[in-house]
Amino acid sequence: MKLNSRPWVAMTLLCTASVFGIYGCSSLKTPATADVAVSSAAVDNAASADGAEYAPVEMRLAREKLALANKALRDKDYERASQLAKEARADARLAQGKANSAKAQAAASALESDIRVLDEELQRSRR
């Protein structure tokens, strides 16, 4: 009876190791895939915010890193894909922030100019 139980123990250990091995590989793939998807959305958002116009260097870096992340994902280098995706997301957010800042500064300048014109009109009408 002891001889028959040993193959089952070995088989159970082998199956358990296989399950953990498969889970380990897929657990790296899932976050990397999610990181690349989130970074892709961040690059799209930055582009929609005119990031290419106001922050062309950051947009170029974000797109290049996103392309490298996608390549690493295809090559099953999930750790590198995740790292590159995070860098692409940071570059895209910086581009979007610069674009939003530039637009806000332009709007503030326009308002200041309008206020100056109104103030001059008010001064003329008082004379």
Image: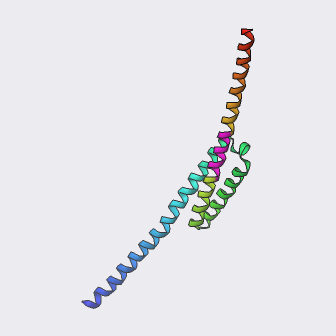
Tell me which residue sits at (31%, 87%) in the image. Answer: 6
Quarter assignment of residue 88: bottom right
In this view, 117 is above or below 106: above
Tell me which residue sits at (67%, 42%) in the image. Answer: 99
Quarter assignment of residue 20: bottom left
In this view, 92 is above or below 10: above
Q: Quadrant of the N terminus?
A: bottom left
Tell me which residue sits at (36%, 81%) in the image. Answer: 11
What secondary structure is the stretch in magenta mostly built from? helix
Indicate the position of residue 115 as horizontal and vertical percent values. 69, 22
In this view, 109 is above or below 84: above
In this view, 5 is above or below 78: below
Viewer-proximal residue among 3 and 108: 108
Q: Quadrant of the C terminus?
A: top right
Indicate the position of residue 28 as horizontal and vertical percent values. 51, 65
Viewer-proximal residue among 9 and 105: 105
Answer with left or right where residue 45 lies relative to residue 3. Answer: right
Residue range corresponding to the magenta coloring: 91-101
Indicate the position of residue 100 as horizontal and vertical percent values. 65, 40
Answer with left or right where residue 55 lies relative to residue 10. Answer: right
Query: Residue 90 colored magenta?
Result: no
Q: Residue furthest front?
A: 127
Tell me which residue sits at (26%, 90%) in the image. Answer: 2
Query: Residue 95 colored magenta?
Result: yes
Viewer-proximal residue among 97 and 48: 97
Indicate the position of residue 79 as horizontal and vertical percent values. 56, 66
Colouring style = rainbow
